[in-house]
Image (cartoon, rainbow, N blue to C red):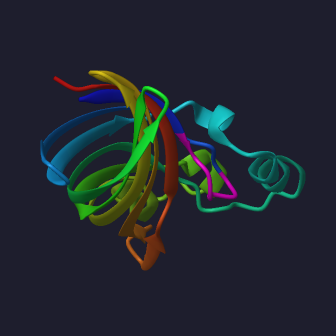
Amino acid sequence: MSAGFGNTVNDPFVNRRFVRADVEYLLDFVGAEVSLLYSPDLGDSDWTPLAKQLVNDYKISPDISKITSAVLVQGKVLARDGRAGSARVTTGLGVGVGLVSTSDDLVALGDNSESAMATAEQEHLAWTMSLQSEATWGGIGIRLRMDRVTYTEVIATETEEKKSPVCLSLGLLLRG
């Protein structure tokens, strides 16, 4: 089990901060994991300087869609890298599916039409892939993790857009 916090790293318009909890079942070097992510909507505090400049200075409306929560289920393979002093260092790769909830920022979009409001809150089936590295000392450790979550969203009931945010997180790991 692990819990941590993280941030999206590849969206030019928003910086999403999130908390996460992961529960895993491991058999030697293969396993399964369920992850829950939650990201509160902080309004324009989530906007990057580029988004603020586009909206406030140039009156350009970027499509800002924010992940608000996700449930990810992955199978994973761990490579036991060995030991560094008293620490056991492990690297792993996971692949799976998930359900992602998103919320469009209608203020940034500059669109309060019925079609925009109809698709402002959405749930998406997603593919997910992760790379993680962890160091443990007995039953406690730290985990650095990068997840890519890929899904397609509908904008104002007219346009489909593929999204693929990368989430980087750091967490505390407990193993029994």
Residue at point 30% right, 53% down?
A: 100
100 or 112: which is nearer to us?
100
Residue at point 57% right, 57% down?
A: 111
Residue at point 38% right, 58% down?
A: 130
Relative to 86, say whether 11 is above or below. below
Q: Where is residue 78 drawn, in percent x and y? A: 28, 55
- Which corner quadrant of the image does residue 123 belong to? bottom left
Residue 146 belongs to magenta span = no
Residue 8 belongs to magenta span = yes
Query: Quarter holding the N terminus?
Result: top left
Q: Where is residue 114 drawn, in percent x and y? A: 41, 59
Kindly give the residue lying farthest to the right in the view shown.
57
* Region in magenta: 7-13
Relative to 61, say whether 102 is above or below. above
Left or right of residue 54, residue 30 in this image: left
Query: Quarter holding the C terminus?
Result: top left
Judged by its main secondary structure, the magenta piece is loop
Mark yes or no: residue 17 visible.
no
Left or right of residue 9, residue 60 in this image: right
Residue at point 26% right, 42% down?
A: 35
Relative to 170, say whether 111 is above or below. below
Left or right of residue 55, residue 123 in this image: left
- Which corner quadrant of the image does residue 38 belong to? top left
45 or 85: which is nearer to us?
85
122 or 167: which is nearer to us?
167
Q: Where is residue 154 drawn, in percent x and y? A: 39, 70
